[in-house]
Structures are given as C-alpha cells and as structure tokens.
Amino acid sequence: MEKRRTNEILLFQKRKLVFTAAAAVVILLYGMASFVTEYDTLLGLSSFPKAFKWIIVNMVPNAKALERLPNILKKLTETALLSVAVTVCAAICAFFFALLGSKTTRVNPVLAGSVRVVAAFFRNVPDVVWAILLMFSFGQNVLTGFFAMFLTTFGLLTRTFIETIDEVSNDCVEALHAAGANYMQTVFQGILPSSISEVITWILFMIETNIRSSTLIGILTGTGIGYLFDLYYKRLDYPSASLVVMSIVILVILLETISGGIRKVIL
Amino acid sequence: MPVLELKNISKTYDNVTKALQDVSITVEEGEFVSIIGPSGAGKSTLLRSVNRLVDATQGAIILDGQDITHVRGKELRRVRTKTGMIFQHYNLVNRLSVIENVLHGRLGHKSAVSGAFGFYTESEKEQAFFILERLGLTEQAYKRCDELSGGQKQRVGIARALMQEPKLILCDEPIASLDPNASRIIMDYLSDINKSMKITCLLNLHQVDVAVKYSERIIGLTAGRVTYDGPAQKLDRKMIYEIYQSHEGQLITDMKE
Amino acid sequence: MNESAAAQKSALSFDIQRQIRKTATGKIKTGAVSKSGFAIKATMLVLLGLSVLAFFTFDYKDIDFAGAVQGTLRNAATLFAAPKLKYASPGAVLNQLFVTFCLGILSTILGAAIAFFGALLCAGNISNPRVSAVIKGIVAFVRAVPTVLWVLIFAVTAGLGSVAAVSGLTFHSAGYLIKAYAESIEEMDYGTIEALKASGAGFWQIVFQAILPSSISYMLAWTFLRFEINFTNAIAMGAAAGAGGIGYNLFMAGYFYFDLREMGYLTYAIVLAVVLLEIAATKIKAKVK
C-alpha cells in the first residue's frame, strides 16, 4: 500500500516534470520564432479586434457589388468545376499508381519503390512552384491551375490510396487468388469494391481542399475566383471583395454538408 | 488414383525459418483428412503450398495426376480452380453481395475481362443460387457480406469454394473464429459435401476432438514434420501428447472424460 | 456446363425462384441492395458528369496546347536538372527557410492555444449545446475562407508583414484545430467524466485530470499535422501575399527575375526541409507515445 502511494506520487511528479519541460520548450520556440520573424505578440493579438471592426465596417456588399454578382458566380462555378475535374482526374491516375505501389498488388518491388518516390516528390514540391512554372508556358489560363493542382493532388492521393489498399485488401486478395482469379479480376472484384468508399471520401475531401487552393493559385496566376478577389482587393473595392469571400464560404460549406451526408451513408 | 500427392515438401522462409521439412502426404479421392498440430507447426504453410499460394522450397506437388510444382500464369489459374479454399477469417469481399462473392468462385474459369467487370452467364448465376439454397442462405443472397454473422460468412466461403466445382477443398482453420454452435453447423456442412458430392476435404484444425469426430484420417504435424498419419480411431492420447509436445495433464482435452 | 445448368434450372425450387431478382430484360441481378451502394454509384456518376462538363465549359482561350506542354516540360527540365543560385546566397536561403519555419511555429502555437479553449466550448459532451452549436458555426465559417484571404484581410489593418501572415495563418489553424480537438474530446468515454462529476470535481479539474490525459496524444498528432500544413501555407503566403520567408524568394525568382534555375534551387531546399520536418515529427510523435 505504502509502495503504491510512493509510485503514484512519483508518477505524478514525473507528469508534472514532463509538463513543465514541454511548456518551457513551447515558450522557448515561441520566443525564438517571434524574434526571427520580428513578430510582435501584442500587435498580433490586437490585430484581431481591429480586423473584425474593419470587416464589419468595410466588408459589406453594397448595390454596386451586387451588380458584379453574375460575374462572381460565373467564376465561382468555374472554380468549383475545376476543383471537381482536377480531383477526379488525379484520383483515377492515383488509384492505378497506388496499385503499383501497394504491397499487396505491386507488380515488382523496384517499380513499387519508384512509385512511392514519385508520389512523395509531387506531394512535397509546393503547388506555388508548379503554378509559377506552368504560368510561363500556359499563361493566364484555366489549365495553369488545372495542372498545378493536378500534380499535388495526384501526389497526395497516391500515398493515401496506397495506404487504403494496403489496409483493405490482404485477406480478400488471397481468397481470389486461391480461386484462380488473375490480376485484373482481383483488382476489380476485390480491391476496388473494398476500397471504393474510402476513395470517395478522400475525393470529396480533396475537392473541398482544392477549392481553397484554387483561390490561392488564382491570385498567383491571375485566373478564376482568386483573380477576381485580387482585382477588387487591389482596387480597394472591399464590398465586392467581400461578396467573393462570402460566395466561396457558401460554396465550401455547401460542399462540406453534402460530403458529410454522403460519408454518413457510404461508410 | 490419389487426388493429391505431396512428395518430400520442404519450405524455408527467408533462408532461416524451417516451416516444413520433408513432408510427404497422399490423399485419396473422397477422403476427409484433418491436419492437427500446435500453432506454428506449419499447418497453414502446408495447406497453402497445395494451391501454390506459398511456393515450396523443395519437393513436388501432384494434383489430380498433374505435377503442378512449377506451373505458372494461366495454367496455375486453371489448376487453382480445382482446389476450393476456405479461410479462418472467411476472406470475403465484405462490401459486395453474398451472390457476388459466391460467383467469385467462377473467376478462374472466365476470361480476364468478363470476370473483372462481373459479367456472369445466367446459368452461372442460377448455379450460385442453387448452391446458396443448399447452404441455407437463399434469403441472404442480396445482402452485403458485412451484414452477416460469422457462421453465415463461413457458409458463403463454402459456397464460393463449391462454385469452383473443385476436386479438393482446403480448409484453413474453418471454425477457429466461430462459436460452438456455428462450428458444428459448418463442420456438418463440410462433412455432408464430402459424403454426398464426393469432394475430397483437407482441413487444418485446432480442436483435436472435432478432428477425431469428423475425419476418417488424421495427420499430426509437429515443427514442420509429419508425426502421425493414420485413422482417427487409432489416435491415442500418447500420440496427441507427442504431436503437441506436451505432458500429461497440460492439454485442455485432458479435462474431459 | 450447359447441360448441368439446364438440369439445375429445374432443380431450383420455387422458394429460390421467388427470391431471385431480375432486371427488366429478365437477367438475374447480382448486386447488393443497399443505400450505400446506390450512394456510391450516384456520387461517382455525378462527379464524372461534372468533370466532363468542366472540360466542355472551360475557357481555353485558343491556347496552343502542345506548344505549352512542350514549353513546360523544357522549363521543368531546367528547373529540376540545373538548380543554381544567382540572386540570393545559400545563407540567405537558409535564413528565409528558417523564417518560414518560424511563421509556421508561431501560427501553430497560437492556433493550438486558441483551439484548446475553443474546443472545450465546442465539444458536445462537455459544453452547453447552444454554445457548442454557435462555436461550430463560427468554426465552419473560419475554415471555409481560404487562408490566403485571411492573410490579405489582416494585411489591410496590420500592414503586410509577419503580423498579417501569422494572424491569418493562426485564424485558419484555430478553426481547423478546434474541430479536430473537439472531435478527440467527443470520442472519449463519457463514463470517465461522469465518474469525476459524481465525485464532486469542478470543470477545470475534469479538464486537466480526465480530458487532457486521455486525448493529449490525438491532439498532439493533429497539432503536428497542422504544423506541416502551416509550413507549406507559409510558403504559399510568402508567394501570394508577400508575407516574407522562402515563398517570397520563390515569387521574386519566378516573376521578377524569370530565373528557373534559382527556382529549382529554392524548390529543392523546400522539399528537403519538408522531408526533414516530416522525419522529425514522426520521431517526436513516437517519443510522446
């Protein structure tokens, strides 16, 4: 009994020690980071209420902004369709790549290894680099955004699908092999049905993410809804810019709700 | 003519672990044979080497009069259609319907494309329903497999194996994940298939009493070697201790009687 | 097969005949009848349809596609095969990478701190349902606005620089982490909280004795993930909103100097940093567990 108590006290002390050490590390990191970036915490914190006040006063759509609504909606539709098309194309390519990279379905180990490296490469090169690179040849074109997002989405989904296929398929693949099924049959009768709901969940998630990235890439490459925001913002036409923000918010929340509903049914 | 002949099979994993050492077994047509032995004795490896899910390091496998030790590709697929397999964890595609899983038994007989996209002939589908009725699963036909109980899933596994019209059914711990009642039902079905359809059955079993009750012949496997091969009636306690390398009073079967 | 099938057809009992479902053309159906299967098919069809629609409605502006692809491939070859610094020194690159890293650190720490308290108000199992609903609504709004727009909005009031960047990144991080933290809290067993309540523990005691210990590892995992996102976002903010760090160098190299080789050098530096951070995060996470 006595021993247990001491153990408990020791555990408690250890926890306290770990907690203190962790807090110290966090504070140290914070201090260092503020110093390096010349970030003023007080100014930073006070920027929040200032920004809110400013938003409430300036970011209100007015009649002139509403006139721009048709154009905003047109660009918004383009952005939404772009995100869907990019994600679907990237997902289809990524699925076949993932088959080559997964432990259960790979054709040979060397190819599987190189698939993983290629996926990691596309995942880790920032989309900003792709956007600028594509901008040189494609110019202010919807395809610039398409390919920039395609490459990063492809990299990310390949890794994710490899994990999904690894998780999902070991047992049923063995049974299908035992019944004499070949590679194609195993993929379409075993792996695809077992992983399709996960795959769709990821596609829906990436569509949402890509709507946000396409805003960023749009600002950078002068396309889509991002360009429109940048245009109004630089002209100090904040009411119109706010309408752009609101339309994006509504689109994203709508998508989130729809994909949440679909997820509930299919998982 | 024997359905299956294993001649001096050895299997070594990663050049170190010896899973099977010089195993020779002959199974005659229509037999019901159980393999018993402690975990890690190589039972699973032995069963999987029969349909070449695992490749033996040495020895020869003769199935239905054909040496299949080195067959590859299309020929391997054709050979595999002759052996149905039933798994401990059922290994069904859970998100597909019962009937689709049963039809998977036909994949080895079909062309790559029609099998991949799930195009089956009407007579194949009718046969699937016929088998399902036999296993008492008619009402579950259109349910997804993840809606079934363990015993029902295993019956789907049996149906899939029967759909292959196999010469031999391999069962890898078919009842290890089931409760006693479902276990009895599954064993009864297997026994019935063996008797009425004359399909040879080769099983791995954990439960010695079940093996003795259902099989005519028992093979004891210990550390990758055959330590017993004979009629179930002649398997006495001493032999069981030898197979499981344990002493009197240590086995759970000792508690009975 | 045909003969035996014919024999079996007659053998199919009335009972099975009744169970079999057929298509309009009289073929036997095999697919499972489930809502989820239908939803999957419908979703796939809609997504494919929208993609096709997208390709038809895009304004391609008569682009010379083959030429653009060739040009891009040539540029990519220069960028990745011959990286070379001309305008910045390796030391400056390292320094700017470090600035980006620090922007990521600051916004993650601030975001996590805000999110911790936000999550306590947001988690359905410990908070007041009405408060929880309000917070959830705000969080959904905050997350729906792309990070870059937050940074640009903060830039108007705070001026371009680290304050706008950190505030913008923090805002989005907080939204993201509140949702993630609240979900980890909601996953915990209500029995534990009930037991502590029964023994007369106050709110903060419950938070620090029950909630924090049981969900800390999830929270840490989410925080690390968010840090990786913030690092990448900080690069993007540097490029798109002039927020400093390596992203700004990238922007200058691309848009002002048109120097692909400089971009290549910066890209490799970033990829190396991201990979190192990922390795470090995995190591730290393993230690925490």
Image: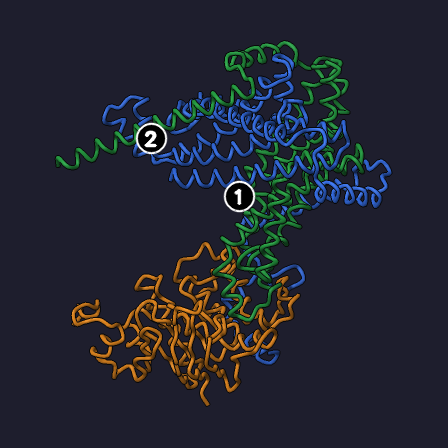
Chain colours: A green, B orange, C blue
At label 2, the amino acid type is: Val
Expressed as whole percent of the image width and height from the top left, the position of residue B15 reads 44, 69
Q: Which one is in front in this view, the residue at disc 2 or the one at disc 1?
A: 2
- Front residue of B215/B196: it is B215
Which residue occupies 87% across, 38% down? C62
Residue count near mark 1 (Cα–Cα under 10 Å), binned few <14, some 14–19, many ≥20: some
Residue B186 can be seen, yes or no? yes
Q: In this rendering, would C265 be left or right of B221? A: right
**Label 1: chain letter:** A
**Label 2: chain letter:** A
Q: Quadrant of the N terminus of chain A?
A: top left
Expressed as whole percent of the image width and height from the top left, the position of residue B195 reads 40, 81
Answer above or below: position of C136 versus B127.
above
Residue B220 lies in quadrant: bottom left
Which residue occupies 59% across, 56% down? A112
- Look at the numbered disc 1 and give the secondary structure of its residue: helix
Residue count near mark 2 (Cα–Cα under 10 Å), binned few <14, some 14–19, many ≥20: few
Residue at the spot of label 2:
A18
Q: Which of disc 1 and disc 2 is earlier in sequence?
A: 2
Measure the C-alpha gap from mark 2 to mark 1.
43 Å
Callout 2 and callout 1 share a chain: yes
At label 1, the amino acid type is: Val
Expressed as whole percent of the image width and height from the top left, the position of residue C176 reads 52, 29
- Look at the numbered disc 2 and give the secondary structure of its residue: helix
- Residue B193 marker: none
Residue B239 lies in quadrant: bottom left
Q: In this rendering, would B24 be left or right of A53? A: left
Residue C133 can be seen, yes or no? no
Residue at the spot of label 1:
A265
Which residue occupies 53% across, 80% down? B68
